[in-house]
Every structure is written in structure tokens, then in C-alpha cells.
Image (spheres, rainbow, N blue to C red):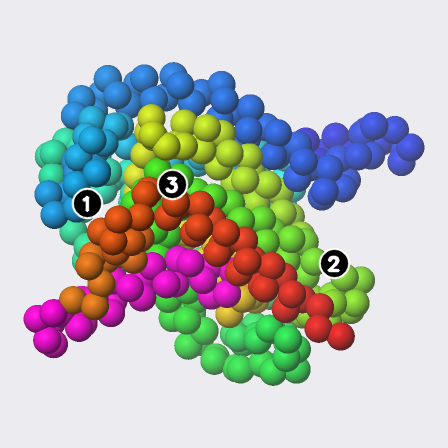
């Protein structure tokens, strides 16, 4: 919205700053961060009053989690409110990729909100039916896939790009849409599975979003793409503003989610942020890089898949408990130890993901 202030610029005044994506990204970050600090505690007070007993705790979970009973959930509302406000304020609202990513984020937040509400109101961990969640998730992701493809350059439309090998493009035709759906739904559910310890999911989300935001800015500039030897996707640079909003809102949320958490993100936040990561990857043609940058989420999801399949086949478990962060809890690792070590892994993976941009 503030981009339109450039209409008053003669090229040499303060209004000219709003032309720069990096300046507006900084503004989005600060707006989202301040939003989190201002509305964080009031939101927690409202959630605590409305939810009573807070988020239900699994009976078969680690014993240390029973001490968290009564902690309110739906804290993702704080992140979503911060990033949506900052994006609408600082991003160019004539950019289709910004609206596509916002659409996925808000729609997945709505699914997560419904799931959190069902859990809190019924005081059980069932929530909304998994089939309903998946059906709605795939529908939203399908719309996003078509949306992004409509604005991709002709030489990239319906194609999958590979990191490092710029000349390698796999043409999927309309099968690209199911591929995009799997990327977005997979990312949303992987982040959702990771959100099981205080502060565990939000920092890796911020790291991954920052990385994809930098990539979005790079592939949205023709001069950068020529130097970095990556594909040019016009318009994706504005996604950096959205990414900055996620980081600012995430830090504001982490202030209250740091151990011991005063509020949980809930599915409201985890599904939305995971869906946003997938949407950014699809928009920027970096779906494969997402698997690297978000490798922690991939491992968390795989641990659940492996556990379920192996148990159905043998009646035995590979891990003491899935997702894998609970496995380490069962082994006696302290919760802060798990969280910080997983943060470190996320940072390493993000650096590897960025390294794919420059291979000359």
C-alpha cells in the first residue's frame, strides 16, 4: 500500500525510498515485530480466558508435557495478523505472487483455526477429520498451483527446475499442478508435525522463510539471475516483503513461545506458515530447494511415515515416539537441548540451500 507514495516522488526525496523492495521489506519486518509486541499479551489473555483448559495434551505423549496443561493455543493468530498487516501495508498490491502466497497462508490458517477450535471446545486431540483437512488443503494448493503457473514465464510454465543445473527443466504439463499441490500440502503438514516443543517450529520457519525470501528477491531480478545462473521469474522479488513479515511476526511470537511457552502456535500457525513456505517455493520455481532448506521438516514428516508403515508391517516401532523430536525426549534429552540443536540443523540446511544459487 505504501508503495503508492512513490507517486509523490520526484526521484530525489524520501518518497523514492518506497520504490525499493529492500526498504519496504525492512518496514514490513519492523511493523510485524511491533505488532507482535503490542498485541501478543492481550491476545494471550483473551485466548486463556476463552479456552479455559487450553490445548489438550496427548495421554501417550512424553511425561514432561503434562506440565504444559492449560497453556492456550491458536497463538498463530498473532503471527498471521502481523504478517498480513505488514504485507498489505508494505508490499505492492498489484503483484499476483504476493496475493497467491497470502491466499494460501490465510486459507490454511482458517483450516488450522477450525482444527484448533474443535480440539479446545471438545477437549480432545482429534480436531477436524484428517480427510477433511487434506481435501481442503489440496483444493487450496491446486488453486495456488494454477495461480502461480498463470504468471510464470512461458519457458518455465508447468516445468520443474533443479538447483545447480539451470539447463535441466522437466516439463510436467498439467501434472505440474498435482506436483505443486503435493509441495504445498506436504510443507504445511510437515511444519505442523514439527510444532511439538516450545519454540521448535517457529525458528526453523523463520530461517527457511528468510532463505526463500532472499531467493525470491534474487530470481525476481534479471541482473541477479544472470550472475547467479538461476531462472528469472519476474515479480517474485515482492515476496521478500512477505518473508520479512513472517520473520518479524515470528520473532514477536517467539517472545511468548520461548520455554516455558505462554502460548502455543497451534495448527492455526503451523499449517499457515508451512503452506506459505510451499507457496513461495512454487512461485519462485524452487520446489526442490525447499526440500533442502526445509530439510528439518522433511525429516520430521518422514519419521512419522516410517513409524506408521513399519508398525503396520511388523508391529514394532523404529523410534521410541514420532515425530522424531519426541524420540529424543524419550531418550532423555532436555527440551531446550532438542530445540536449539534442531535450530542449528535448520541454519546449516539454509546455508546449503543458499549455496545452490552460486556454483560458478
| Real-space Cα separation, disc 2 to disc 1, in angstroms | 48 Å
Please say if 306 is above or below 279: below
Q: Mark 2 vs mark 3: which is more N-terminal?
A: 2
Provide residue 39's location: percent of width, then percent of height: 44, 20
Q: Quadrant of residue 224?
A: bottom right
Instruction: Name the residue rendered at 33%, 42% in the picture.
Output: 335
Read off the magenta span.
291-316
Provide residue 321's location: percent of width, then percent of height: 20, 57
Magenta residue check for 304: yes
Magenta residue check for 88: no
| Real-space Cα separation, disc 3 to disc 1, in angstroms | 14 Å
Q: Mark 3 vs mark 1: which is more N-terminal?
A: 1
Q: Which mark is residue 62?
A: 1
Return the residue at label 2: 221
Instruction: Name the residue rendered at 10%, 43% in the picture.
Output: 59
Q: Is residue 32 left or right of residue 128?
A: right
| Real-space Cα separation, disc 2 to disc 3, in angstroms | 40 Å
Label 2 SS: loop
Label 1 SS: loop
- The answer to whether the residue labelled 2 contacts the one labelled 1, judged by CB atoms less than 8 Å apart, is no
Examine the residues drawn in magenta and state their main secondary structure. Answer: helix
Residue 297 or residue 136, whichever sits in front: 297
Return the residue at label 3: 336
Tell me, yes or no, if residue 267 can be seen here. Answer: yes
Instruction: Name the residue rendered at 50%, 51% in the picture.
Output: 344
Discs 2/1, front: 1
Residue 205 or residue 281, whichever sits in front: 205
Amino acid at each position: 500500500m505504501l508503495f503508492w507514495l512513490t507517486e509523490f516522488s520526484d526521484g530525489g526525496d524520501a518518497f523514492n525510498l518506497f520504490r525499493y523492495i529492500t526498504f519496504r521489506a525492512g518496514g514490513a519486518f519492523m511493523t510485524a515485530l511491533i505488532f507482535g509486541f503490542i498485541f501478543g499479551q492481550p491476545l494471550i489473555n483473551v485466548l486463556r480466558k476463552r479456552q479455559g483448559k487450553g490445548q489438550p495434551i496427548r495421554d501417550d505423549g512424553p511425561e514432561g508435557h503434562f506440565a504444559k496443561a492449560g497453556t492456550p493455543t491458536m497463538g498463530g493468530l498473532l503471527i498471521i495478523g502481523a504478517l498480513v498487516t505488514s504485507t498489505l501495508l508494505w508490499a505492492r498490491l498489484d503483484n499476483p505472487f504476493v496475493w497467491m502466497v497470502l491466499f494460501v497462508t490465510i486459507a490454511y490458517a482458517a483450516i488450522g483455526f477450525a482444527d484448533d477450535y474443535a480440539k479446545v471446545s471438545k477437549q480432545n486431540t482429534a480436531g477436524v477429520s484428517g480427510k477433511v483437512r487434506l481435501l481442503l488443503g489440496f483444493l487450496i494448493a491446486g488453486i495456488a498451483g494454477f495461480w502461480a503457473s498463470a504468471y510464470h514465464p512461458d519457458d518455465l510454465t508447468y516445468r520443474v527446475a533443479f538447483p545447480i543445473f539451470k539447463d535441466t527443466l522437466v516439463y510436467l504439463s498439467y501434472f505440474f499442478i498435482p506436483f505443486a499441490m503435493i509441495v504445498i500440502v506436504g510443507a504445511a503438514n510437515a511444519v505442523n508435525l514439527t510444532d511439538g516443543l516450545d519454540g521448535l517450529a517457529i525458528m526453523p520457519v523463520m530461517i527457511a522463510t528468510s532463505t526463500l525470501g532472499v531467493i525470491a528477491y534474487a530470481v525476481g531480478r534479471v541482473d541477479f539471475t544472470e550472475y547467479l545462473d538461476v531462472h528469472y521469474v519476474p515479480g517474485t522479488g515482492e515476496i521478500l516483503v512477505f518473508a520479512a513479515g513472517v520473520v518479524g511476526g515470528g520473532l514477536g511470537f517467539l517472545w511468548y513461545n520461548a520455554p516455558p511457552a505462554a502460548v502455543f502456535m497451534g495448527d492455526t500457525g503451523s499449517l499457515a506458515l508451512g503452506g506459505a513456505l510451499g507457496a513461495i517455493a512454487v512461485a519462485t520455481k524452487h520446489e526442490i530447494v525447499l526440500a533442502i532448506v526445509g530439510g528439518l521438516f522433511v525429516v520430521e514428516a518422514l519419521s512419522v511415515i516410517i513409524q506408521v508403515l513399519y508398525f503396520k508391517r511388523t508391529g514394532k516401532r523404529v523410534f521410541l515416539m514420532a515425530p522424531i523430536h519426541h524420540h529424543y525426549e524419550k531418550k532423555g534429552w532436555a527440551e531446550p537441548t532438542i530445540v536449539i540443536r534442531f535450530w542449528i540443523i535448520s541454519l546449516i540446511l539454509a546455508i546449503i540451500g543458499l549455496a545452490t544459487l552460486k556454483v560458478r
